């Protein structure tokens, strides 16, 4: 490994909680609060949710363990870790490509993630200034449409979010991340529980929400919905693109990967389910359609806050926390690339970050325009807007494919003894993990891919 410049391993995170916090910070974000509810709504509810949970356990957990173990063992940016670990196999360069595909996924995801997080900043500001107080659902819905219809406004907030992401990355993620996640996550959790309480007590439709989220009607389950559920399980756990591998590189040797991954997965899943349980009763109480799309979180919760005592305060705090959760996710999309750029080229963090964020920002303009200037059919491909295409390519193709290759790499390519040491499991547990990585997780991904191609 001598040809590589100083590896990030030079500094491991001293505190054993830091990896948990960083990985939870990466995992918990817009995927849980914004994307999970609206995808569930668009895919008919329970059948989608159950499939998603199945994918989390069977595919997500073993692959997350693989990523963390590979990252800790390789101790470099994902691109170089994969190359180094594959050294000696004929396909060393090819495995480096998995890192590249991950970087591409991160690039594409961040481009629209920043736009949606920008909506979140707009809502934080508008909530705090009381614009929504006393509004009806229709009015809140109209104001959401007005925001997304304005390229100028959305561009401004998209820019603000990108600059914030760049600032955190350039300063080095270790400093701010640990504390902000430690404060933010519990606060977010409490506010979500508060919203859940409101839904239970005030909506009058709580059981309808529960039923929608968990009733399994197999006839709702198209292969299309199954692919979305699989893709979302990668998206929500930040898998298949090297984010967890990059953080794993900083993980102390003593920390247990299985336990750490377990807590991250449980937290991530709990937050998504609580968000769904808070949102859907409000959807039904307000006579809205569950398949309203990307505005679902913003419209339902804003109209709840608009009519809640202290709603201005809690509402602005909630959207602020949404933005912070998005920020701790967005930095995990940039970190692998910036780590690689500083290893590979003679650039500092600031230069690498500035250049990279500028390009992502520009690409993100396509998603800004998807909700206004470019929403028309003449701008669509296969009936999808620019934003929808980018979302589809990443969540449904590059992340699962990247995850599949990582699983194969961890299960078949790298020496068994390396991974065995990293995971530090009992023999039975290790064999189960290995069977999942070698056969079961790849088979699930492949079957779902092919079923979609054929169906
Ligand atoms: N897991 C994040 C979320 O649920 O919001 C999104 C994400 C972060 C995806 C980092 C991919 C990634 F590398
Ligand atoms: Na998530």
Image (cartoon, helix red, strand yellow):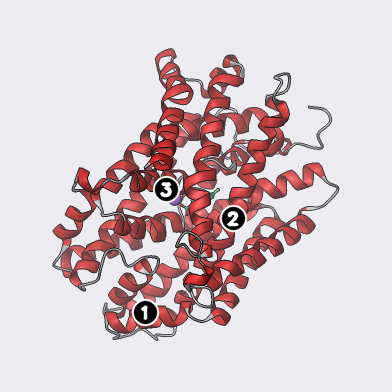
**Percent x, y for residue 185?**
44, 55
Quadrant of the snapshot with the N terminus: top right
In the rendered structure, find residue 234 and report the number of the disc placed on it. none
Disc 1 designates what residue?
Answer: 312
**Percent x, y for residue 322?**
45, 64
Disc 2 designates what residue?
Answer: 108
Identify the mark nearer the N-term, 2 or 3: 2
**Percent x, y for residue 94?**
69, 31
Q: Secondary structure at mark 2?
A: helix
Q: Nearer the viewer, residue 242 or 39?
A: 39
Q: Nearer the viewer, residue 37 or 160?
A: 37
Instruction: Determine crowd level at label 2: few under 14, some 14-19, many 20+ residues with C-alpha closer than 10 A.
Output: many
Residue ranking furthest to the right? 346
Left or right of residue 217, residue 62 in this image: right
Q: Looking at the image, is 298 positioned above or below residue 29?
A: below
Q: Looking at the image, is 373 positioned above or below residue 426?
A: below
Disc 3 designates what residue?
Answer: 232
**Badges 2 and 3: C-beta atoms under 8 Å apart?**
no
- At 34% across and 48% down in the image, what residue appears? 225
């Amino acid at each position: 490994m001598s040809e590589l410049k100083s590896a990030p391993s030079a500094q491991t995170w001293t505190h054993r909680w830091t990896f948990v916090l960083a990985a939870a910070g990466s995992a918990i974000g817009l995927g849980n609060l914004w994307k999970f509810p609206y995808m569930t709504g668009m895919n008919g509810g329970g059948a989608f949710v159950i499939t998603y949970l199945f994918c989390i356990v069977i595919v997500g957990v073993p692959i997350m363990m693989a990523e963390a173990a590979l990252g800790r063992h390789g101790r470099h940016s994902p691109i170089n870790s994969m190359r180094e670990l594959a050294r000696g196999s004929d396909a060393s360069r090819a495995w480096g490509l998995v890192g590249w595909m991950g970087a591409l996924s991160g690039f594409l995801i961040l481009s629209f993630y920043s736009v949606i997080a920008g909506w979140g900043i707009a809502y934080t500001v508008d909530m705090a200034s009381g614009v929504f107080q006393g509004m009806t659902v229709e009015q809140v819905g109209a104001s959401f449409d007005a925001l997304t219809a304005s390229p100028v406004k959305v561009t401004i907030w998209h820019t603000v979010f990108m600059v914030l992401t760049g600032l955190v990355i350039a300063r080095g993620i270790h400093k701010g991340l640990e504390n902000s996640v430690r404060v933010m996550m519990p606060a977010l959790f409490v506010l979500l529980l508060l919203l859940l309480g409101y839904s239970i007590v005030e909506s009058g439709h709580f059981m309808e929400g529960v039923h929608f989220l968990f009733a399994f009607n197999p006839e709702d389950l198209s292969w299309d919905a199954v692919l979305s559920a699989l893709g979302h399980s990668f998206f929500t756990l930040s898998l298949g693109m090297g984010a967890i591998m990059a953080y794993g590189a900083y993980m102390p040797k003593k920390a247990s990967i299985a336990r750490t991954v377990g807590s991250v997965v449980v937290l991530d899943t709990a937050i998504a389910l609580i968000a769904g349980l808070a949102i859907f009763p409000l959807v039904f109480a307000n006579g809205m359609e569950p398949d309203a799309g990307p505005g679902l979180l913003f419209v339902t919760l804003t109209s709840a806050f608009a009519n809640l005592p202290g709603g201005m305060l809690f509402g602005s705090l909630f959207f602020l926390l949404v933005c912070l959760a998005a920020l701790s996710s967005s930095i995990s999309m940039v970190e692998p690339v910036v780590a690689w750029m500083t290893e590979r080229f003679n650039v500092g963090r600031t230069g690498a970050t500035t250049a990279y964020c500028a390009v992502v920002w520009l690409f993100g303009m396509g998603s800004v325009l998807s909700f206004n200037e470019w929403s028309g059919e003449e701008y669509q491909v296969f009936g999808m807007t620019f934003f929808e295409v980018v979302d589809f390519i990443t969540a449904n193709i590059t992340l699962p494919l990247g995850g599949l290759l990582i699983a194969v790499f961890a299960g078949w390519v790298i020496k068994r003894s390396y991974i065995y040491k990293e995971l530090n499991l009992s023999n039975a547990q290790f064999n189960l993990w290995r069977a999942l990585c070698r056969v079961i997780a790849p088979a699930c991904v492949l079957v779902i891919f092919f079923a979609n191609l054929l169906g």
